[in-house]
Amino acid sequence: MGSNDQYPEEAPAHPVRVNGFWMDRFVVTNSQFRRFVKATGYRTLAERPADAATYPGALPELLQPASAVFVKPPGPVDKGDHRHWWIYTVGANWRHPEGPHSSIKGREQHPVVRQRRGPGCAPSRARPI
């Protein structure tokens, strides 16, 4: 993993071991996920407020529907602090991937983002889409 030949923050190249995991054969597109949501009324975690009881003491603004959005750093950054490239963005979800002022218009065939498979959400298997 990493590279000694590109950006300084990617170095050094080094071996990494990854435990086994499952990956679907095909991606779920925004268009397919939209049909799934319309048919089921499903709301992703990024579209639901967090439960205050699950996060006692959390600031109210951190309980709003949100998601982490990748933002390319302007240059080399401290690799130990993910906040340089992942920004907690209120209103970011699969319909608004970069935040409330973005949309999926023109990206209907792109893979859906800001959602995860979990209880009640298996759009690629729940029904033909």
Image (cartoon, rainbow, N blue to C red):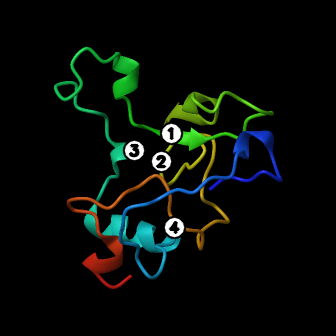
Q: Residue at x 29, y 69 (%)?
A: 122
Q: Residue at x 73, y 35 (%)?
A: 73
- Label 3 is placed on what type of residue? Ala
* Residue underneath mark 1: 68
Q: How far apart are marks 3 and 4 (CA)?
A: 15 Å
Q: Distance between the residues labelled 3 and 1?
A: 9 Å
User: Residue 99's quadrant in the figure?
Assistant: top right
Above or below, 22 relative to 55: below
Q: Is residue 60 left or right of residue 75?
A: left
Q: Can you tell which of label 4 and label 1 is closer to the viewer?
A: 1
Q: Residue at x 64, y 30 (%)?
A: 84
Q: Looking at the rendered structure, which numbered label has been put on residue 93?
A: 2
Q: Residue at x 32, y 61 (%)?
A: 117
Q: How crowded is mark 1: few (under 14 residues within 10 Å), some or many (20 or more)?
A: some
Do residues under tags 3 and 1 come within 8 Å of each other at their CB atoms? no
Do residues under tags 3 and 2 come within 8 Å of each other at their CB atoms? yes
Instruction: Residue 48: give x, y in percent of width and height.
Output: 32, 41
Label 1 residue SS: strand
Q: Looking at the rendered structure, which numbered label has been put on residue 46?
A: 3
Above or below, 41 relative to 48: below
Q: Residues within 10 Å of mark 4 (few under 14, many from 20)?
A: many
Using the rendered image of the protein, determine whether residue 99 is visible from the camera's viewpoint: no
Task: Look at the image and tell me in which quarter the C terminus lies.
Answer: bottom left
- Label 2 is placed on what type of residue? Asn
Q: Distance between the residues labelled 2 and 4?
A: 11 Å
Q: How crowded is mark 2: few (under 14 residues within 10 Å), some or many (20 or more)?
A: many
Q: Is residue 127 left or right of residue 82?
A: left
Do residues under tags 2 and 1 come within 8 Å of each other at their CB atoms? no
Instruction: Residue 102: give x, y in percent of width and height.
Output: 63, 46
* Residue underneath mark 4: 30
Q: How crowded is mark 3: few (under 14 residues within 10 Å), some or many (20 or more)?
A: many
